[in-house]
Amino acid sequence: LAKTTQPISMDSYEGQEVNITCSHNNIATNDYITWYQQFPSQGPRFIIQGYKTKVTNEVASLFIPADRKSSTLSLPRVSLSDTAVYYCLVGAYTGGFKTIFGAGTRLFVKA
Amino acid sequence: NAGVTQTPKFQVLKTGQSMTLQCAQDMNHNSMYWYRQDPGMGLRLIYYSASEGTTDKGEVPNGYNVSRLNKREFSLRLESAAPSQTSVYFCASSIRVATGSESPLHFGNGTRLTVT
């Protein structure tokens, strides 16, 4: 199972773009990269998922280089409400979704 | 649309007591999971169920049992609670998609368990 490494915490200001990088050197061929967001007292919420290159949705962009050993979650123009913990997961469906959540990255957005 | 519903939201137990955490999803998902989250840490997988009638151990299964009652419900039981099981417990579900595509996890809002 691929393990992930992310920064423990990051600070930003409202209106800035935030990039959170995740390392996953042992990613397997059939693994997807998935990012979740977690607010206090809530369960994690899916943000974005990708396999290679770039994926964009209304919330974020996910950049994945050709070797897939890392990925970067990009949050455009963050607001105070983006303060949360962000988790990078790597895994695939194998008859049971065995994935490993790391400690995540605590993003604190300041006014 | 309720999504993933967990009950109870809060629970306090004494060491040695037993209890069952309930989880139900209304999204017709195949797979269900139980995680625990300790303060300042990520989520650790306790057990999962890829389909009705099957269950498998995750990272930290000791001290827990699970039952996949039907496609909707997946319960987690603590037979003899210990202080080390004080945690927030999250249930999640996902749907099996055709090869090459993976469903993200849908989480409930957790059960906060304290064992004294």
Image (cartoon, coloured by chain):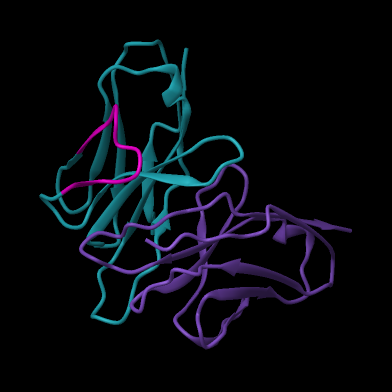
Chain colours: A purple, B cyan
In the displayed structure image, the side of residue A60 where residue B48 appears, left or right: left
Q: Name the residue: 52% across, 35% down.
A: B38
A97 w.r.t. B81: above or below: below
x, y (%) of residue A16?
A: 83, 72
x, y (%) of residue B29?
A: 26, 62
Quarter assignment of residue A10: bottom right
Please name the predominant secondary structure of the magenta segment in the image. loop
x, y (%) of residue B105?
A: 39, 61
Quarter assignment of residue B83: top left
Please give the count of numbered marks on the rendered protein.
0
A70 w.r.t. B10: above or below: below
Q: Name the residue: 41% across, 74% down.
A: A32
Q: Residue furthest left?
A: B53
Q: Residue furthest right?
A: A111
B16 w.r.t. B86: above or below: above
In the displayed structure image, the side of residue A61 where residue B25 appears, left or right: left
Q: Name the residue: 29% across, 36% down.
A: B61
Q: Name the residue: 25% across, 58% down.
A: B31
Bounds of the magenta span?
Answer: B55-66
